[in-house]
Amino acid sequence: MAIYKFRITFEDFDDVVREIDIKSNQTFEDLHKAIHRSTGYNAEKSSSFYVSTDNWLKGDEIAYLPSERKKDRVVLMENSKLSGFIEDPHQKFYYTYNFDRPYDFHVELVKIILDADPNIEYPFLAKSSGDAPKIMEQNSPQAVDPRGAAAAASEFDFLNEMDFVPEDTDELEAMGEMGINEEERDEEEENEEDEFGDEFSDNDHYDEDGHKDDY
C-alpha cells in the first residue's frame, strides 16, 4: 500500500507547516480531518479541496458538507479516494476551510512511499512546524485573526481606538464642524471683522489725505 506525504501550509502563513502521511486508498475526508487534528480547528465545517495547477489555479472541487446549491455540482470527500485524483508526483490541491469564515491552504504531494509502516496508524502527522493561528470566533475576544494584523487593522474602530467613553458625547455635541468650538468660531469671526475693519479704516485715511493734496 503506497503512502502519500502531503505538505500543508497556510496561504498567508508560510512558517506554519504540517506534513501528513496518509494511505493512497484513504479519502479526502480522512485528510481533511487529519489537517484539523494538527491545527486544533473544528473539522465539522463546510470545506473543499480543489485539484490545482502548479500556479494554484482551482480545478475540480471535492467538498465536505457542501451547501444545497453545490451538492449536485461537486463530488464528496467521503466518497473520493486520494489515489483517484493524483495525476502528478507533485500533485497540488488548493484547500479552503470553513466557507463561513474561509481560510486557505496549499496542499502539495511531496513524496510517495511505496510501503506503509505497519507500526503507524494513518493518517500520521509526520512534521509540525509553527503554531496554527487561532480562529476568530464570536464571543471570543482573545482569539487572533488568522488573516493577520493587516486584516485586523482594516476593521479599525475609531472611537474605541481613541479611548472614547460615553461621557464624551456631551463634548462632541458641543463641537461645531471640523471640531471647532462655537465660542472659538465666534472669536475667529470677530478677529476677521476687526482685520477688515482696520484695513478699510486705513484706506479711508489714505483717501482723505489724497483728497487734501488735490486741493
Image (tube, grey):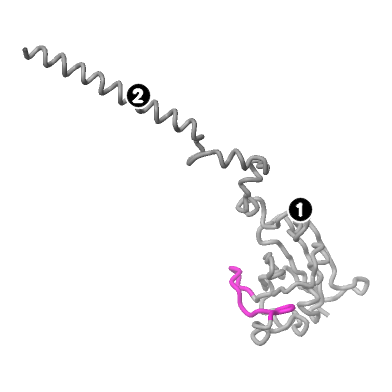
Q: Tell me if residue 108 can be seen.
A: no
Dot 2 alpha-carbon crowd within 10 angstroms: few under 14, some 14 to 19, many 20 or more: few
Work out whether 3 lies above or below 204. below
Placement of the N terminus among the 4 image quadrants: bottom right
Could you tell me residue 107's position as x and y percent? 70, 68
Q: Which residue is mark 1?
A: 141
Q: Residue at x 61, y 77 (%)?
A: 59
Q: Nearer the viewer, mark 1 or mark 2?
A: 2
Say which of 178 and 2 sits in front. Answer: 178
Where residue 75 sits, quadrant-wise, is bottom right
Q: Is residue 155 magenta?
A: no
> Residue 15, located in which quarter of the rendered image?
bottom right
**Residue 154 - label:** none
Secondary structure under the numbered disc 2 in the rendered image: helix
Query: Where residue 214 sits: x, y (%)?
Result: 7, 14
- Residue drawn at 39 percent across, 27 percent down: 190
Q: Residue 72 appears at what percent x and percent y?
A: 66, 87
Q: Position of residue 153 (x, y in %)?
A: 63, 50
Tell me the residue that label 2 is attached to: 194
**Magenta segment:** 52-67
Graded by Cα atoms within 10 Å as few (under 14), some (14 to 19) or many (20 or more), the crowding at tag 1 reads few
Could you say which is closer to the camera, residue 11 or residue 23? Answer: 11
- In this image, 207 relative to 155: left or right? left
- Is 189 placed above or below 113 here? above
The amino acid type found where label 2 is placed reads Asp
